[in-house]
Image (cartoon, grey):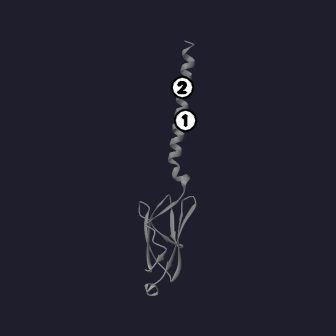
Amino acid sequence: MTETTPFRTVIKLCLVVIGLMLMTTYVVFQARHLIIGPEIVLFDAPATHQNERLVHLSGQTHNISRLWLNGRQIYTDAKGRFEEALILENGYTIATLRAEDRYGRETTVTREFVYTPASFIE
């Protein structure tokens, strides 16, 4: 009987260690969005040089609570997608998307555009 007691103790200890490892892995997996922070992904970003004054910016966000385009708050749908129109000024325009999560962490995506009317190109 004394020979089986250490074996059972080792088995119990191994099961406890495996259980703790599984629980830790699950907690880290569930916390991945908190760890990563806010994300902005642009779909089909328009070209830098534009002949049209109106540019459409569309994309998807992850882990955000607020989103701004050039300081103006914009909104996403339930899946985090957004689509906004931007009117370009003559010459050089910078579009800045800024997102913030509920913990105050921020991320920005900046795109630069140069508007040249078609009459100047010809």
> Callout 1: 10 Å neighbours few (<14), some, many (20+)?
few
Q: Quadrant of the C terminus?
A: bottom left
**Residue 62's disc number:** none
Whether 91 is drawn above or below 74: the answer is below
Q: Secondary structure at mark 2?
A: helix
Q: Secondary structure at mark 1?
A: helix
Q: Position of residue 57 (x, y in %)?
A: 45, 70
**Residue 3 placement: quadrant:** top right
Q: Residue furthest top?
A: 1
How many neighbours does mark 2 have within 10 angstroms: few (below 14), some (14-19), or many (20 or more)?
few
Residue shown at the point (41%, 60%) measured from the top left: 79
Q: Is residue 90 above or below residue 34?
A: below
The residue tagged 2 is 12
Residue at 54 percent across and 30 percent down: it is: 16
Q: CA distance from mark 1 to mark 2?
A: 12 Å
Residue drawn at (54%, 40%) of the image: 24
Dot 1 or dot 2: first in sequence order is: 2
Q: Amino acid at mark 1?
A: Leu
Mark 1 sits on what residue? 20
Q: Give the mark count.
A: 2
Q: Residue furthest front?
A: 122
Residue 64 horizontal/vertical position (percent):
50, 60
Q: Is residue 71 above or below residue 14?
A: below
Image point (54%, 35%), residue name: 20
Q: Mark 2: which amino acid?
A: Lys
